[in-house]
Amino acid sequence: MTSSTRPFLNRRLAEFGTTIFAEMSALALRTGSINLGQGFPDTDGPEEVREAAVRALRDGRGNQYPPGPGVPELRTAIAAHQQRWYGLSYDPDAEVLVTAGATEAIAASLLALLEPGDEVIALEPYYDSYAACIAMAGGTRVPVTLRPHEGSFRLDLDELRAAVTDRTRLLLLNTPHNPTGAVLTRAELAAVAELAVERDLLVVTDEVYEHLVFDDAEHLPLAGFPGMRDRTVTIGSAGKTFSFTGWKVGWVTASPPLVAAVRSAKQFLTYVSSGPFQYAVAEALALPDAYFTAFREDMLAKRDLLAAGLKDAGFDVFRTAGTYFVTTDIRPLGESDGFAFCRALPERAGVVAIPNAVFYDHREAGAPFVRFAFCKRAEVLAEAVQRLKTLA
């Protein structure tokens, strides 16, 4: 028997190896380091939500295949959430789709809406699944880079306009933005909306950090801007808002034709998932305002704790307006290669972080930037800060 010389991995995915998160998390385990790399909390979310999942299991709700679009209780709760927070009205039956986390929602949206060769503009640096999903859909990614400006990362609207061509089909936006912590302003979103209408573009917006905005920033769904209701696919997730990332419950809200298109792709991915957890998330979305306020204030305190510690350790720290990540510049420490820095950091200081360059097509643009997650217990962050001070 002869072995094939043809590569097993198709050319669309050839550039994507093991994710940086797997590499750095394995490094954290091997070295006993504090893992501030991968963005998952080290505590569970509200006890009443966890008990709701247990109750659903015991009552036999969701232990078999749930409905393909999601259980009615959750779809109704998602629609109510959009109305409660943003004044956006969605039909639970025709305009809401439950997915296996936001990652599947992104994949299904791109697989459904793109034809091979279509161009997709994404804000660089971007979450690594964006590039892989665009590739799987046969699209061509066109990065528009968020650049440092007055202590934070900002979108250059002129650069965005210049990136649109006759082949552009879709804008893929993420606000609040991972990894930079930027939150697009009302003026920026209005300009994006005008551009999308002018050039007849679809927009997929990843808004999973919608309830984690700080200081004077506010989260505004793009779907609420003039002309955007029928051309925007909005993606949300329970994992980031309720600290149950392992449940993998996400959703899409959009006009009926867009939801039908995304559902056509989604049904051949997982088909359905997270049965009992869907009922629990339905209850979570109805939690009082006090929960969302306390959640945001807790993360704000952790942001400030880590940001101050990183500054004391010698990093240049960018302002985080949303998400639970802090981006730093390592050049004040005499470093310029984020990959080398992060691979050496566990041995040097017993802490793991993520090199932002992995989120860039233009790797050199992200080379000196490193991301730390602050969605950890305060005592863990305090210990990490103490360890990082050895770098100063």
Image: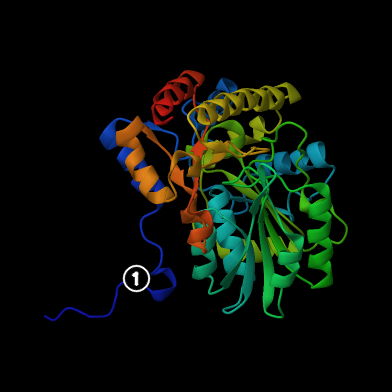
Task: Provide the residue designation for mark 1.
Answer: 9
User: Number of numbered discs present?
Assistant: 1
Quick one: 319 or 253, which is closer to the camera?
319
Q: In this view, does 121 lie to the left or right of 274?
A: right
Q: Residue 283 at what x, y percent from top left?
A: 65, 30
Q: In this view, does 321 lie to the left or right of 278?
A: right
Report the front residue among 306 and 243.
306
Please tell me in which quadrant of the rendered image residue 238 appears. Answer: top right
Residue 207: percent from left, percent from top:
67, 47
Lateral position of residue 383 relative to residue 107, left or right: left
Q: Is residue 60 above or below residue 220?
A: above
Q: Which colour scheme is used?
A: rainbow
Where residue 261 sits: x, y (%)? 66, 66
Which of the image's four quarters has the N terminus?
Answer: bottom left
Say which of 335 and 350 sits in front.
Answer: 335
Mark 1 element type: loop
Residue 169 seen: yes
Between residue 335 and residue 290, name the one nearer to us.
Answer: 335
Which residue is outermost to the top? 379
Looking at the image, can residue 228 be seen?
no
The picture places residue 50, in percent across and down from the top left corner, at: 53, 26
Instruction: Please give the name of the residue rendered at 59% of the width and 32% of the height, measured from the top-left corner.
Output: 242
Of the 4 image quadrants, the one containing the C terminus is top left
Q: Residue 385, relative to residue 97: is it above or below?
A: above
Which residue is found at the position 57% from the left and 55% from the top? 125
Please state which amino acid type lies under the numbered disc 1: Leu
| Residue found farthest to the left | 1
Residue occupying image coordinates x 34% and y 71%: 9
